[in-house]
Amino acid sequence: MKEKTKEKLLFCLQEVSWIKELLAEKQTDSITARMLCIYASIRLDDVYHCMPDYPDHHPNKAYTDPIKEEYKKRWQDARNKLGGHFQSIEVSEETENRNLGDIVERNLIFQTITFDKLKEMLDDATIFYQIATHTEDVEPDIVSLSVIDKQTLVDVCQFLNNSDRVLLSSSALHLSQKNAVGVFFCSPAQQKVQKLLTIETCVYLAHTLYNKVYTDTNIQLMFKRMLICWIMNYHDNLFNPASSDTAQQYDKGLDELLYEMFKAEKDDATRNQIKKYFDKLKSLPIYSETIVAAKDIRNTACAHLDSTLNLPDINTRLLGFDVRKLYRLYDCMYKTLRNVLDSHFLLQHLAIKGQTFYDMWVEDKGVLNFYNDETNQVSSNYFTNTITLEEAIKVIKEHEMESFDLAMEKVRNTLFKAKGRQYQLLKKLILSRFRADDLSYDELTTYADIFYSIRHGYPEKNCLFFIQLWSALQRKDKRSHRFILYSIAGSAVFDVKGETKKLIEELAISKYEPHVLYGAVINAKACIHSQTSIYAYQQNPIVDARIIDYCNNVGNLQLRLATEIALSSRWFCGNDIHFGNWVNYNEFFESQLLMVLASYLASASLDVENADILNTLVREHKYSELLWYIFRIEKQITGTSGVFASLIEDCIYSGNRSYDSETAYWALCMEELGHIEIAHNWLKKLHEDNLDKGLTMTFCRFLQRHAEYLDELSQLRASLLDLYSFTQDEIDWMEQDKQE
């Protein structure tokens, strides 16, 4: 046997040994453990291919042939279908429900991977190494993990361990996941999405492990190999292979499957939109060169070890490969998939994953545990009966992160049920907190989130309770009022006691302008609720006179415009009160806003062209962009944003979630109001979550305006050329706010 072959064999044993040593700590869940073993199967495949083909009469054949057969039986499918590639699994014509054949077979392969089988195969591979190298009496020179490196790896595995909770899973491997709730999809395109979501979990695991610091740099190289393999699997499932790619492992990519799917649906608009997303990704400067280089390194140093190169040369090539650039491209692929999934209702639900369920466990599905020992139990941290209401309120008050989600769930569930002694006790506890002197904005924010989430439960009960809280809160700082008024606006109904009516009347005559705006929203919500029934979508009622009267009684022009923006945005873009075929309401809210806006623009002496822009924004329901323009008009006239600032700061209006640009304009409005950090965080998130040059340019220009972010701007610029090509006009636009 050649020396370079011996080196590669020992290298394979070393990497598999590290994985076995880590898994022996039993700190991983079965999913993570098996994903690590899939990489081990890639290295075991190299061992298999390095085995000499002994003639029949050779005494070693009796040892090596069983090892080969054992590998084929236990590991080859895991390597080919889950690791080196993530390819489709062919099932026989006789298989019942062939559409589900792939996912069933994939999970069967996945569950055959156990810790015991890993140990057995490593022992077999070690024996083969000793036979092939004539070192039967000598243990291979395998290096154990250092104490520091082992602890680093264990910490990551503990962090990723989800075996203590019930999760919603969109993975193609959800059948193999204990305490997981998943869905079967029959469409080839939807199943391909499931595979991509599964690979995302693998990429996340590899990337997390790769980004740690190790005393032995070869450990990081192992995770670099793993990361490259799975990112390339992601790419090869996202895109239809080139015509030259005729190898067995290639099958249709998501782009081709979606093209076929929406062609069959005769939905050309969605098909073309999805194609634009994929074309945009492929047109990035980073794409072609990076994929070519990554395929080469995947095929010579990761999923395979080049037979013509020795191990040091292979590692040198791997060290020279810029995996950060490949990961940036993966991030672009990830964003593209999210855009694709958001493009049609048949795909949108696939993006939902990782949600934790409380107060439940999943009946044993017969899932084989990786360690073949006791079944993992769901932690008491996810059962609300393990915490009292008093304890939950204390956790929320002190913002104790360890039990915070459980406490919120306890309070939310009790309020949603709205009955019994526990409900009455909880109301007293919350009322006590609203009266307390140490009530913080963070605590109020938490309660506002909880209250809004239960708006579809028992609205009359909730509304009356929230009005009680308003009575306790209104004597405090006016800036705190928004938290409870926001909650009332979500659940507002007219009650038999007349408490809601009295509140609206009180708010309408308030000298504090945000009160007037919230009064309009609460009044509209209660009025519209009084007109609804189980047949609401078949109706088209006339506009409630109480809404018209409230608006007409708002005398100040700026306040009236802010009121119309609040109502129109809530109607067209909110989550609470919109019925698409209520044409009377559609026409009323839009026409009222246009009418008042015309009066406002006339008073501001705005030219016709700019007025047309704002009118178009109203018709397109782009209220955040509209407000940004109004902010600038107001600052020219009065030097402030006036009452319009309340729409943003007090969460009174609703932005149009159909446009990322609307979120960007909301952030720019926050910048205008002096909330620079909030604006920065949201603009950064938009840049990071979307493959959109315009959003990136907006973020760059924002960074340029603020000296504290100039270092971040420099770092961002270094990567932009990988993503986009900029014209000189675009560069000039981004640098308009450059600080000299």
Image: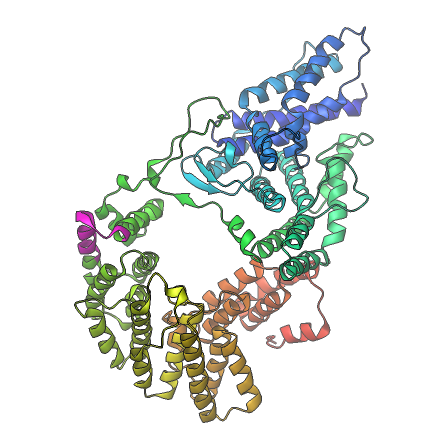
- Count every numbered label the image shows and give the total: 0
Highlighted range, magenta: 416-430
Residue 683 percent coordinates (x, y): 53, 65
Q: Reply above or below: 419 against 681.
A: above
Does residue 26 sit above or below 359 in this rendering? above
Residue name at image x 55 percent, y 73 percent: 705
In the rendered view, tell whether residue 443 sits above or below residue 586.
above
- Locate residue 306 relative to residue 152 in the image: left or right: right
Horizontal arrangement in the rendering, residue 419 relative to residue 230 (left or right): left
What secondary structure do most residues of the magenta stretch adopt? Answer: helix
Q: In the rendering, at what x and y percent does residue 333 appear?
A: 64, 52
Q: Splitting the image into 4 quarters, where does residue 99 fall?
A: top right
Task: Specify the quadrant that holds the C terminus.
Answer: bottom right
Q: Residue visible at 53% across and 48% down?
A: 350
Question: From what the image shows, is residue 510 above or below residue 173?
Answer: below
Could you say which is closer to the camera, residue 610 or residue 650?
A: 610
Does residue 734 show up? yes
Residue 75, x across and y down, in percent: 64, 24
Whether residue 223 appears in magenta in the rendering, the answer is no
Residue 133 shows in the view: no
Picture residue at 36% right of the left edge, 73% below the top: 541
Instruction: Tell me residue 95's x, y (percent).
Output: 61, 29
Q: Residue 299 occupies which quadrant of the picture? A: top right
The residue shown at (33%, 66%) is 532
Q: Which of 416/133 is in front?
A: 416
Work out which quarter of the rendered image holds the N terminus and state it. Answer: top right
What's the colour scheme? rainbow
